[in-house]
Each structure stands twice: as C-alpha cells, then as structure tokens.
Image (tube, grey):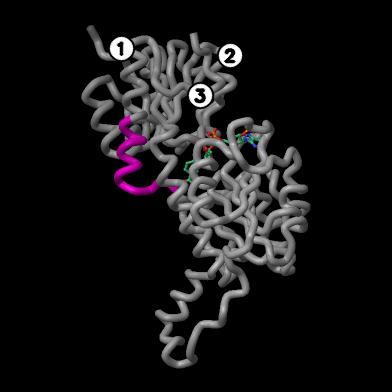
Amino acid sequence: MSKPHILMPGRMMDLVVQRLDDAFTLHKLWEAEDQEAAIAAVADKVEGIATGGHRRVDGDFMSRFPNLKIVSNFGVGYDTVDAAWAGKHGIYVTNTPDVLTDEVADTTLGLLLMTVRQLSETERYLRAGRWEKEGAFPLTQNTLRERKVGILGLGRIGKAIAHRLEAFGSPIAYHGRNKQSDVPYRYYDNLVEMARDVDILISVAPGGASTHHLISTDVFNALGPQGVLINVGRGSVVDEQALIAALKEERLFSAGLDVFEHEPKVPAELMAMERVVLLPHVGSASIHTRNLMGQLVVDNITSFFEKGKPLTPVAETPVS
Ligand code: NDP
C-alpha cells in the first residue's frame, strides 16, 4: 500500500521532517524551485499538510488539495490556519497544546521579572562597566511586591502562569469571554475595567480576528503610568503603535514582549526604549519542549491515518 502524501510548505524542525519522511510520502515544498508547479504535480495526492506557520494555510490554499483531510500545526496558536474553513470542509486541524504549557509559563514569569525590575537594563549597565565607574544602578521604580496582576486569556498557559504567581503572593484577576467556575481568581467581563484595577496585565490570548488590537489606548490608559504590559500570546492582540505612543508619553510604565505584530520585525521605537524588554518569540523555545511539540505534529498525522482520529484536534474541527 502506498504511503499517504503529506505536504510541508515550509521547512520544519529536523525531527518532524525526518519522522514524516520515514512514515509518509513527504513533499518538501520549500525545496521546489517552482512551487506552483510542485503543488500542481501533487495536488490530487496530498491528504495531509504539516505546517509551522511559515505560510498562511487559508481556504484558497487548502482548496487546491481536493483530498486534504488533516492540517497538523506546530504550536498551540493556529491563527495562520483557517480552521473555521477547514472545519466546514470536513478537514481536521490539529495543534500542539499542553506539552508547551509549563515552558511558556516559566518564560512568562522570567519576562515579567525582567520587565518589572528592569533586569535587562541592569545587566547592560554592568556589562558596559558602569557599575564600577558610576556606582550602583538606580533603584527600580517598579516591583512585583504589592502589585495586582490581570491575565487576559486564562486558558491552559494562563492558568499555569496564575499558579506560579500564587507562589509569588500576587493577587490575580482575569478576563476572557467566559467566567470560569473552577478558578479562585476574580473575573472581569470587561478588559478595561480589569486594567483599571490591576497594575500588571499579562496577555496570553490567541491571535485572530476576535482578539485583534484588543489591547489598545483605552487599556493602556486604564493601567496607568505605573502600569506594565506583558505579552506572550500573539502580537496582533496589542495595538503596537498605540503601545509605542503610551510608552513615549509615559502613560504606561513599561512592557515585556515575546510576540510582535509583524514578526520578526520589531519597531525601532521599541528597540530604542531601554526599559522595555523584547524577546524574539522564545516562549516555548527549548530543545526539550520543541521536541515534544514536533513529536505531537507527527503523532497527530500518524494517529489520523492509523486510527481515523488525530490526538489534539482544535475546537473548529468536525469531531465525529
Ligand atoms: P487556550 O485555548 O487554553 O486559552 C486561550 C484563552 O484565551 C482562553 O482562556 C480563552 O478564554 C481566551 N480567549 C480566547 N479568545 C478570546 C477573546 N476573543 N477575548 C478574550 N479572551 C479570549 O490556549 P493556551 O493557553 O494553550 O495558549 C494561548 C495562546 O498562547 C496561544 O493561542 C498562542 O497564541 C500563545 N502562545 C505563545 C507562545 C509563545 O512562544 N510566546 C507559545 C505558546 C502559545 P474564553 O474562551 O473564556 O474567552
């Protein structure tokens, strides 16, 4: 029996490429000189797509593969795949939840401390020899002590962040579309109201149309001049130009960002701000966790072709 054909639009980590190559007929689209011709040559055969978000897997793209049955996405966020379109057309979309939750929560706490206590800036100060020449770094204006934290998106990762913050003794509130009955934290059905009541806003909400620019001027103004924004969710959730304006005008104290609107481009204005902490989307980026995510991309495809069902289909998928 011939192996099912899987298309990989952009190069993914070696583990995924090798394991899919071993078990399936893998078409490495990024290697083709003429990608349009390469797609046309295999369009009827392709039953699965493995994607790491290099290219949008939208309705137009998926409709070119009449026998497509599954799109396996690397990452828990799948905003580069039109899962609603796939769902309507009976195509499974899978992501890689849970295996990255603790890693991303750890990174978030690191970013939070770096931002609130200006740790990047203090290290730059030391490395520039300024400690020896100029004396101690000025005391930081901000602290995690006696500060309230609001979480936008209390899902898997949001809860793991909250759990860690409990150990820090931080009062926690959250905003999402739904109040959750099984958490002890205060719920706000309005993001601006929550921002008014907290000092630090951590965003770990997914990207996509429903969260686009959810965090903008009104939220920054509600957080206020001592307020801090941490974004580890998706860059599109934050209105970057409004953030730059709020920071410049000192309506917001600082920001710690792991994600940006137009990655890997980061606005020069943010780069120039000493106090702001900027990470190159490394929330889950350890070898340990990325291997687990890669294996889950493979396992979803394998499970679908062996058992008829993937392991971690997203909500929009037609689960039978
Ligand atoms: P979950 O689906 O478990 O949680 C998402 C949360 O967001 C839910 O609590 C949901 O609550 C809330 N949410 C969704 N839509 C909206 C909306 N329109 N308005 C307000 N709240 C909303 O996902 P995970 O916790 O596993 O992952 C969250 C996100 O983190 C991913 O989608 C991804 O974008 C990002 N991420 C970033 C990484 C990095 O490297 N920086 C790594 C991994 C993930 P409700 O349904 O009640 O609204």
At numbered mark 3, what does the secondary structure look like: helix, strand or loop?
A: loop
Mark 1 against mark 2, which lies toward the viewer? 1
Is 6 displayed left or right of 134 in the figure? left
Residue located beneath label 2 in the image: 88
Name the image quarter holding the N terminus.
Answer: top left
What segment carries the magenta color?
283-295
Residue located beneath label 3 in the image: 314
Query: Residues under labels 3 and 2: Cα distance?
Result: 13 Å
- Viewer-closest of 4 and 189: 189
Above or below 35: residue 216 = below
x and y, in percent, of residue 17 in the image: 28, 32
Mark 3 or mark 1: name the one nearer the start of the chain: 1
Q: Which amino acid does label 3 sit on?
A: Val
Q: Which amino acid does label 2 sit on?
A: Lys
Is 278 displayed left or right of 96 in the figure? right
Disc 3 to disc 2: CB gap under 8 Å: no
- Give me the residue at 53% from left, 52% from top: 165
Number of on-image labels? 3
Residue found at the very far bottom of the displayed protein = 133
At numbered mark 1, what does the secondary structure look like: helix, strand or loop?
A: helix
**Ligand 1 closer than 8 Å to the CB at disc 3?**
no
Mark 3 against mark 2, which lies toward the viewer? 3
Residue located beneath label 1 in the image: 306
**Ligand 1 closer than 8 Å to the CB at disc 1?**
no
Query: Residues under labels 1 and 2: Cα distance?
Result: 23 Å
